[in-house]
Image (cartoon, rainbow, N blue to C red):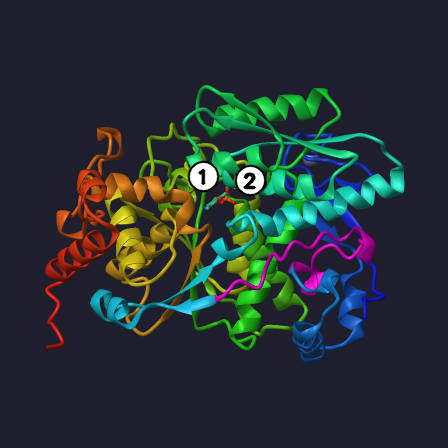
Amino acid sequence: MFPQYRGKLEYVCLGCGGRFGIDELLYTCPTCGQVLLLEDLNRDALRGMGDGAYWRNVFDSRAATRETALRGIFRYYELLAPVLDPEDIVYLGEGHTPVVEGARALQQHLNARFMFKNDGQNPSASFKDRGMACAFSYLRYLVRSKGWDEVLGICASTGDTSAAAAMYGAYVGAPIKTAVLLPRGKVTPQQLSQPLGNGATVMEIPGVFDDCMKVVEYLAEHYRVALLNSKNSWRILGQESYACEVAQWFGWQVEPLCLFVPVGNAGNISAIMSGFLKLHELGVINGLPRLFGVQSSHADPVWRYYSADPASRVYQPVQVRASVAQAAMIGNPVSFPRVKALADRYEAVRPGAFNVVQVEEQAIMDATIQANRHGHIACTQGGECLAGLLRARELGLVGPDELAILDSTAHSLKFSGFQEMYFNDAFPAEFEIHADRTLANRPVEILSDEEKKVLSVQAFTRAAAESVAERLKLHGLH
Ligand SMILES: *Cc1c(COP(=O)(O)O)cnc(C)c1O
Ligand SMILES: [Zn+2]
């Protein structure tokens, strides 16, 4: 049954506190230009409907529903965007990604307890689908309520935002079209193939993500376009579902957990804090988990801010350098003001619960390779989280018995080029990564094309099998 409850959502400016209705698509405050968050003014009514146990039961009972509108991220409908009608909701199988325990040998070897939440098992193979499902559902609602006959969705991307935007855009179809702006040569071939395959207009711009972001910001200020970056607060709402899922998976007992999240534009970590705060406010959870943002030393403005003394913290964008955590290679995160505001609220509930750690490129790549050799499907940002956990263990921030949940934000396949560079020890110098040659893994050539040509089918099969058996040192049966 689709819920009756409807919220009263407003944009709230994190700069001047201004409030604005949701019948316009706003990305920044019309008064002061700061970023926004969406707030439900009817939250008291939600609390009036039942206590924490009531809501836990509501969310748990939806786990079995076949109503697709409540099957993905909108299992937590009342907490996300409770203005949408079921017909608005786009469902492509996003959300409810598995939590997989770290391989035993790896946990032992690293002397750390962890599980990966494989957000790469979302439909476009990254967590961006969570936010995009919400942004497109809201766009559908706008199109329906305003009778628009043309909408252009547009985004800048380090790869995965454009993949998600193009996929949802193509699925929803007219009157929505999608265009994406990518930094030339700074997204992987797999990521580039996604928006191309989904038929979006793909444009490449020289520079890095931050350059592309400025261009789409200009476009959003001067033209009628729907900005699909996480500057769009509807994206943040959808990504809050990650926090809800973690809480639900652990039986709504999250205080003992340490969550590790890679930080790029800082939308995801903002959403995760906001999600846990909402659950806490509604009494669904009784405490907050500890949260660790992770940044590479090649793109670390948020770490720099938080590593300074609270009294002398100054936010400054950084010039990024080449990073294997390429999806998080951002020097001037759009959501930094959200992180600041939400981390303050988070720490007001649980002091010391928000941390940021910095890791080296070498550690990111080693962790990624190690994880996948143990049967995981960690992307380089997932490896960054594992490296972040090891760093936090080194710093004494996390004990050997504490359980860490590592956000593998995309599928390893999107970043296979970095694996190849590692196996060939062929990283360009700027990455500052050297391979552990004992980990290199390459295909073994069995017989040549020439041999295939001159041998009969039978003789070839036999020769190939004998060659394989020799390589593998197999023992004969007789
Ligand atoms: C976008 C992205 C990130 C960074 O998330 P932000 O919300 O920008 O901080 C990390 N990993 C992957 C795989 C991504 O696509
Ligand atoms: Zn403002």
Q: Secondary structure at mark 2?
A: helix
Query: Which one is nearer the viewer's eye here, 350 or 100?
Result: 100
Q: Is residue 258 left or right of residue 458?
A: right
Is residue 94 covered in magenta? yes
Amino acid type at image mark 2: Ala
Q: Quadrant of residue 207?
A: top left
In the rendered structure, which amino acid carries the disc numbered 1? Gln
Callout 1 secondary element: helix
Q: Residue at x 33, y 39 (%)?
A: 417
Front-most of residues 179 and 316: 179
Percent position of residue 279, x then y? 63, 66
Q: From the viewer's perspective, tell me whether residue 94 is left or right of residue 453.
A: right
Residue linked to disc 2: 163
Figure quarter occupied by ligand 2: top right
Badge 1 local density, few (<14 within 10 Å), some, or many (20+)? some
Q: Which residues are magenta?
A: 73-98
Does label 1 or label 2 sit earlier along the sequence?
2
Point out the frontmost of discs 1 and 2.
1
**Percent position of residue 208, x then y:** 44, 26
Position of the N terminus by quadrant: bottom right
Dominant SS in magenta: loop
Separation (CA) of disc 1 from disc 2: 10 Å
Left/right placement of residue 206 relative to residue 273 reads: left
Dots 1 and 2: beta carbons under 8 Å?
Answer: no
For disc 2, the neighbor class at 10 Å (few under 14, some 14 to 19, many from 20) is many
Q: Is residue 202 above or below residue 159?
A: above
User: Percent from the top left, x then y, of residue 435?
Assistant: 18, 44
Q: Quadrant of residue 371?
A: bottom left
- Say the numbered circle drawn on residue 190: 1
Q: Residue at x 24, y 59 (%)?
A: 394
Question: In front: 313, or 110?
Answer: 110
Q: Which mark is residue 138?
A: none
